[in-house]
């Protein structure tokens, strides 16, 4: 197949630091190419993903993330550059609604964010002409009236993630500076458990800086350290040395990439049971799902009893790049042929044979 992939315009592919969607596009592009398909990527200038790219893209500018004009301009650029591919997989919000897309080219799109009431009308319009992928069953259930073609969990190249032994004696937090991520709760739980906490978080826009200044910075101290935003190597070093990842999300997150990254490093995850977390974490095996700060703290004190090799194994089977790519290819073939896959082929793969 000749497959066109469209990434958002604000961060290169792969991302130098923060960038969940861009990470997934990178993993998918590499996996599709490795499987023998031709891949053409429309992404911000400076992208280093080793597949052919649509030339002439503007430079990435994370400070303008979410700007509607940027995404619209990028969509026009992308579809003009992808004319002639067999199929397009668009990871933007605006692109699938672009009326001058190449005619008769099957379109796949992924809902990377929550299917909120305000966005459902947009996704209904998309689903009329595109195959829509949800990234968790919880996300799909949140919009039962929306036609979703497939639920496909994210995957990562676990072989590129070094396995840590958790000997640092600290807990860690990774995410962005936003109330939804539960950083005050993580700080409270770590302090109650008497365990140092190391924080790595994205802080680009004004709201994130303000949240840090007014809410998080006063909570820092010798036992709670903010490290800034880390690159990939430093992120995995932080995860590998941690006793556990604290991820007390305060919203129904559609999929938590940081959780599967932690598991790949062999590090258990302690999370609130919201959104996709119960689909990722096996309570009592690869981490703990707990509600309040006291319960999170108690789980943190138990995290050292969990089998870190089991965490790695879960990432390498259930959340591998090969499994994710294989599930996408089944959907692509269905979109190209117009023949729905059998029911058993639409179910998630047993990925142990793909690792």
Image (tube, grey):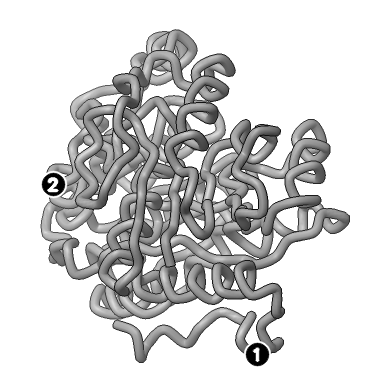
Res. 29 in view: yes
* Nearer to us in this view, 148 or 337: 337
* Nearer to us in this view, 218 or 114: 114
Q: Residues within 10 Å of mark 1 (few under 14, many from 20)?
A: few
**Residue drawn 39% across and 50% down?**
25
**Residue drawn 34% across and 47% down?**
23
Residue contact at pointers 2 and 1, CB within 8 angstroms: no
Q: Residues within 10 Å of mark 2 (few under 14, many from 20)?
A: few
355 lies left or right of 336: left
Q: Residue 327's x, y, as percent?
A: 50, 74
Res. 296 in view: no
193 lies left or right of 236: right
Pointer 2 or 1: first along the chain: 2
* Nearer to us in this view, 31 or 246: 31
Query: Alpha-carbon distance for marks 2 and 1?
Result: 38 Å
- Residue 305, above or below 142: below
Q: Which mark is residue 233?
A: 2
* Nearer to us in this view, 106 or 324: 106
| Location of residue 31 by image quarter | bottom left
| Location of residue 309 by image quarter | bottom left
Q: Which mark's residue is nearer the viewer, 2 or 1?
A: 1
- Residue 153, above or below 46: below
Q: Residue 141's x, y, as percent?
A: 76, 60
108 lies left or right of 162: right
**Residue drawn 27% across and 43% down?**
14
Q: Give the residue furthest to the right.
A: 145
Q: Which mark is residue 344?
A: 1
**Residue drawn 53% across and 22% down?**
66
Helix, strand or loop at disc 2?
A: helix
Q: Residue 291's x, y, as percent?
A: 59, 52
């Amino acid at each position: 197949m000749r497959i066109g992939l469209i990434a958002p315009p604000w961060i290169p592919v792969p991302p130098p630091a923060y960038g969940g969607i861009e990470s997934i596009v990178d993993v998918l592009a590499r996996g599709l190419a490795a499987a023998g398909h031709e891949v053409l990527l429309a992404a911000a200038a400076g992208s280093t993903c080793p597949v052919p790219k649509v030339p002439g893209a503007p430079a990435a500018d994370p400070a303008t993330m979410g700007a509607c004009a940027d995404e619209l301009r990028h969509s026009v650029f992308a579809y003009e550059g992808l004319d002639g591919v067999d199929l397009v997989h668009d990871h933007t919000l605006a692109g699938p609604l672009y009326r001058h897309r190449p005619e008769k080219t099957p379109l796949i799109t992924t809902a990377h964010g929550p299917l909120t009431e305000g966005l459902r009308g947009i996704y209904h319009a998309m689903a009329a002409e595109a195959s829509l992928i949800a990234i968790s069953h919880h996300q799909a259930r949140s919009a039962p009236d929306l036609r979703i073609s497939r639920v496909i969990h994210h995957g990562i190249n676990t072989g590129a993630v070094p396995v840590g032994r958790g000997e640092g004696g600290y807990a860690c937090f990774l995410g962005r500076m936003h109330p939804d991520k539960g950083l005050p709760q993580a700080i409270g739980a770590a302090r109650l458990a008497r365990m140092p906490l190391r924080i790595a978080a994205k802080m680009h826009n004004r709201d994130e800086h303000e949240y840090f200044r007014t809410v998080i910075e006063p909570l820092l101290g010798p036992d709670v350290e903010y490290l800034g935003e880390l690159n990939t190597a430093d992120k995995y070093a932080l995860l590998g040395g941690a006793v556990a990842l604290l991820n007390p999300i305060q919203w129904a997150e559609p999929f938590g990439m940081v959780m599967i990254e932690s598991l790949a490093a062999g590090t258990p995850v302690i999370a609130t049971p919201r959104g996709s977390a119960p689909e990722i974490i096996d309570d009592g095996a690869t981490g703990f799902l707990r509600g309040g700060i006291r319960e999170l703290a108690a789980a943190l004190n138990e995290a050292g009893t969990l089998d870190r090799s089991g965490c790695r194994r879960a990432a390498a089977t259930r959340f591998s790049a090969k499994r994710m790519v294989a599930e996408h290819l089944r959907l692509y073939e269905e979109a190209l042929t117009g023949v729905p896959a059998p029911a058993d082929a639409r179910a998630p793969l047993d990925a142990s044979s793909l690792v």
